[in-house]
Image: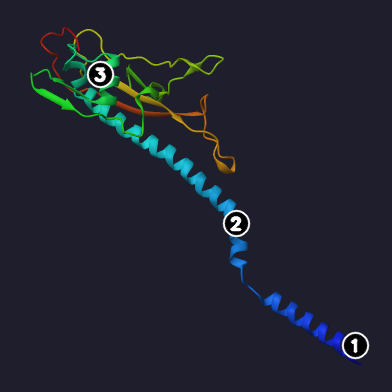
Amino acid sequence: MAVLRNVFCAGKAIRHFGKNLSQDRQGATMVEFAVIAPALLALLLAILYSMLIYLAQQMLETAAQSAGRLMLTGTVQTVQLANGHVGMTASDFKNAICNGFSGTDANGQAITVPSLLPALLTCSRLTVNVATASTYNVGSAAKPTFTYDSNGVLTSTGTGYSYQSGGSGKSRIVVLQLVYLWPTGKGPLGLNLVNQPNSNRQLVATSVFTTEEYSCSASQSSC
């Protein structure tokens, strides 16, 4: 009888333990979080990955608008810089976008313009393309095609710097493009926004405008 009683008591204790175990929710939240945490973290990283690219694109658009304004008003074409140049060369214009500039305008007034390129973007990754168009159309704003060698080194950008002919450059349709190689890579969840070699994404900001009425500097025959 004692043996049966012990067996009965043991079975009862096991059933009681199993019932308590099935009702015990301690640690459930931790287990659930451990299951969904990797997916949640990957989603957050994917959002951050995309957000940085869109942020860089927006900053490049702002820089293109500001640089376009300088060319639209004739400042780029007529300013006399501290280096003696009257009217910016291609390197002058890029340096002005990256670092700002000081000089004298066509009327002899001193001007100072701060850097147009946000701190998050570096000048070494920026390419400036300036061209003219006869009419406003989509084809005039096609993005430049970058060419690389077998080692992934950039050899050609398909860009240039041309906005004037003989005489004044006023009332001309100008296409200004800022092209930037944003360093990135494959993101989580299979997200991949790379479109250039060396894990870069090419960002292009375009500003198309007609230059205003402006006068060349006294030392310029054309601007």
Q: Residue furthest bottom?
A: 1
Which numbered circle lies on residue 3? 1
Residue at the spot x=43%, y=15% of the render? 158
Q: Quadrant of residue 68?
A: top left
Q: Nearer the viewer, mark 2 or mark 1?
A: 1
Q: Position of residue 56 (x, y in %)?
A: 39, 35
Drawn side of residue 5 relative to residue 144, left or right: right
Q: Is residue 197 above or below residue 185?
A: above
What residue is shown with label 3?
A: 172
For the question of whether residue 198 can be seen, the reply is yes
Figure colour scheme: rainbow
For the question of whether residue 136 can be seen, the reply is no
Query: How would you rate the neighbour count of disc 3 (Cα within 10 Å): few for under 14, some for 14-19, many for 20 or more?
Result: many
The amino acid at mark 3 is Arg
Q: Secondary structure at mark 2?
A: helix
Q: Position of residue 33 (x, y in %)?
A: 58, 60
Q: Position of residue 85 (x, y in %)?
A: 19, 11
Q: Nearer the viewer, residue 101 or 12?
A: 12
Q: Is residue 221 above or below residue 94?
A: above
Q: Quadrant of residue 104?
A: top left
What residue is shown with label 2?
A: 36
The amino acid at mark 1 is Val
Q: Nearer the viewer, mark 2 or mark 3?
A: 2
